Image (spheres, rainbow, N blue to C red):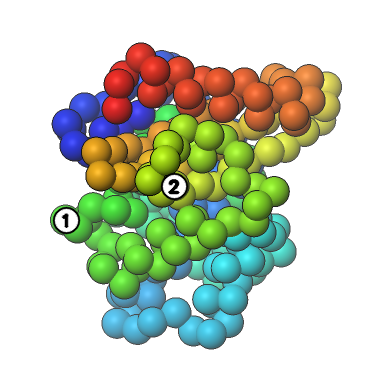
Amino acid sequence: VFDRKTGEKYAYRGVEPYETASVVKVQVLACLLLTAQDDDRDLTANELALAKRMIRASDNDATTALFGRLGRYRGITGCNKRLGLAETKVNSAWGLTRTTVDDQVTLLNELADAKGPLNPGSRKLAFELMNTVRTDQDWGVPAVAGKGEEFTVKNGWLARSTEGGRWIINSVGRVTGPETDVSIAVLSHNHGTMAGGIGVVEKVAKLTRQHLKY
């Protein structure tokens, strides 16, 4: 958890690497926005359509298309350096990128920080896409949001053949409101079922609010 109001960051196993599954799509989005900014342009209609599918519906084909256009793992790695993601190792199979909760809350904060590398238009678009994911994908971080608060989220889920078909379940996002401005990342693996993993992730996310009092 990173609390923007207090400047405090809290982590459990903060630098332990986890495979991202689909939460890497937030990195791809940030890199796409940075690349367009570098060219002093808006996203093309096709880029925007792909970004919407990638974030709102977690579409893998759209992600693969953007990943390729951005230079695959070398291109995304270059963007990660600009975003301060020192512990994230991009994989040519994008869903097997390895990251840490420390890096994920850094990325989430960069998507909102007026002093960061993303301009107001890019920050607004990132918020809009992550605030309007499909209803079947608004689990995880959204479970923390209370009345009058908004959330952004991107989840990742993957049954790993190398772990006996057990599940990676990840959730990253932000909760904002009149008194709240936090970035939250929960990364986990080795769940017997997807539903069981979601339950664990949501319980952990809620416990952070209970104990950190944000």
Residue 152 makes an appearance in the image = yes
The amino acid sitting under disc 1 is Lys
Res 115 label: 1
Closer to the camera in the image, 77 or 46:
46
Closer to the camera in the image, 26 or 74:
26
Q: Residue 81, how many percent across, how many down?
A: 33, 49
Q: Residue 65, how many percent across, how many down?
A: 64, 68
163 up-or-down from 183: above or below: above
Q: Residue 139, how many percent across, how many down?
A: 60, 39
Q: Residue at x 58, y 82 (%)?
A: 46
Nearer the viewer's eye, disc 1 or disc 2? 2
69 up-or-down from 207: above or below: below
Side of 4 relative to 204 (left or right): left
Q: Residue at x 65, y 24 (%)?
A: 199
Mark 1 residue crowding within 10 angstroms, few (<14) / some (14–19) / many (20+): few
Q: Residue at x 55, y 68 (%)?
A: 51
Closer to the camera in the image, 207 or 165:
207
Q: Earlier in the sequence, mark 1 or mark 2?
A: 1
Side of 96 relative to 148 (left or right): right
Q: Residue 61, how many percent across, how many down?
A: 71, 64
Secondary structure, mark 2, is strand
Residue 72 makes an appearance in the image = no
Q: Quadrant of the N terminus?
A: top left
Mark 2 residue crowding within 10 angstroms, few (<14) / some (14–19) / many (20+): many
Disc 1 vs disc 2: Cβ atoms closer than 8 Å? no
Residue furthest to the front: 147
Secondary structure, mark 1, is loop
Side of 76 relative to 93 (left or right): left
The amino acid sitting under disc 2 is Phe
Q: Which residue is mark 2?
A: 151
